[in-house]
Structures are given as structure tokens and as C-alpha cells.
């Protein structure tokens, strides 16, 4: 069953989120687009019965944050557990544990690779228009170099 995002946050979460400067990347991310409308496109991926899932808009924001900070599923799981400000950005309460790495993987599988790529590209395009991400290419030289070591 599709989970719904809570509209009213608790005092602690609101207080932690209030500490983030207004022009910070995380606040800009939260206000980027209509996440609920974006997630509504995924309603057909969920059944009408069962336990509520992590809301898809929360999952999309987590995966976009993961893209921005360039980390693995396990690392974003740890980041959400250790950094309360990240919870406020993605839509979790300050004391609410984020989804584990396997939930992130199952979400991507549930949506499907083509559909997820199209949805994610729309988020990235919106972020590019808002100046959150850029088009600069970063090249890394990865050629083999012999080390000067005693053998």
C-alpha cells in the first residue's frame, strides 16, 4: 500500500529543519518541485492493501540526495540515521529512521529502470534549471603509474 507523507511535522523535526539556512542546498531541494504530483505518477506501482510503504516522494528525494552527495545505498542509509538535517530535507521526522538500503533497491525495481530513469531525469532537469546541479564535466585521470618503491 502506498504510504502518504505526513503533512504536520513534530516540534523537534521543525526545530532541526529551521536551523538550515534559507539559501542552503537542502532547502532548495525541498522546494524544487511538486514532489507529491511527481509521486502520484507511481500510484499504479502500489497495491491497495498491506502495510503502508515509505511515501514515494520521500524515496525520490532520498535517491536524488544520494545522487547529489554521490554515495551508495548503504551510505545514504547511514547519513539519514546520523544527520538529522538530511531527514528534514527528504521528509522524515528527526527521530524517524530512514529506509534501509534494500528498501531503496526494491523501490527502484518496483518502478522499473526505464520509468525510474525518466522520472529521475525530470528531477535532475528541474534541479539544473534551479541552479542546484550544473553541466560541468569532471574528468579523472585514471592511468596506471609505476610507483617508486623498493621491491
Image (spheres, rainbow, N blue to C red):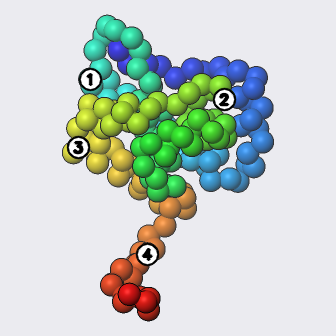
Left/right of residue 149 with respect to residue 29 in the rendered view: left
Residue 24: percent from left, percent from top: 68, 53
Q: Of callouts 3 and 1, which one flags the residue occurring earlier in the amino acid sequence?
A: 1
**For the point 44% across and 32% down, which residue is it?**
100
Q: Which residue is mark 1?
A: 44
**For the point 54% across and 40% down, which residue is it?**
78
Q: Residue 138 — which label?
A: 4
Q: Which-is-in-front pick, marks 2 and 1?
A: 2
Q: Of callouts 4 and 1, which one flags the residue occurring earlier in the amino acid sequence?
A: 1
**Could you classify mark 3 by the number of other residues whose Cα lies within 10 Å: few (under 14), some (14-19), or many (20 or more)?**
few
Q: Which residue is mark 2?
A: 94
Q: Secondary structure at mark 4?
A: loop
Does the CB distance between marks 4 and 3 fall below 8 Å?
no
Residue 18: percent from left, percent from top: 76, 38
Q: Quadrant of the C terminus?
A: bottom left
**Could you classify mark 4 by the number of other residues whose Cα lies within 10 Å: few (under 14), some (14-19), or many (20 or more)?**
few
149, above or below 25, in the image: below
Task: Mark yes or no: residue 111 visible.
Answer: no
User: Closer to the camera, 126 or 73?
Assistant: 73
Q: Which residue is mark 3?
A: 113
Left/right of residue 49 with respect to residue 10 in the rendered view: left
Amino acid at each position: 500500500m502506498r504510504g502518504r507523507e505526513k503533512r504536520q511535522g513534530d516540534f523537534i523535526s521543525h526545530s532541526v529543519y529551521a536551523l538550515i539556512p534559507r539559501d542552503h542546498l537542502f532547502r532548495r531541494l525541498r522546494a524544487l518541485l511538486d514532489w507529491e504530483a511527481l509521486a502520484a505518477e507511481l500510484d499504479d506501482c502500489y497495491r491497495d492493501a498491506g502495510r503502508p510503504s515509505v511515501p514515494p516522494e520521500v524515496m525520490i528525494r532520498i535517491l536524488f540526495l544520494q545522487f547529489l552527495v554521490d554515495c551508495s545505498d548503504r551510505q545514504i542509509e547511514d547519513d539519514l540515521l546520523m544527520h538529522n538535517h538530511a531527514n528534514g530535507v527528504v521528509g522524515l521526522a528527526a527521530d524517524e529512521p530512514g529506509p534501509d538500503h534494500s528498501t531503496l533497491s526494491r523501490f527502484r525495481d518496483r518502478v522499473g529502470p526505464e520509468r525510474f530513469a525518466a522520472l529521475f531525469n525530470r528531477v535532475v532537469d528541474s534541479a539544473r534549471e534551479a541552479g542546484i546541479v550544473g553541466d560541468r564535466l569532471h574528468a579523472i585521470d585514471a592511468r596506471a603509474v609505476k610507483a617508486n618503491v623498493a621491491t
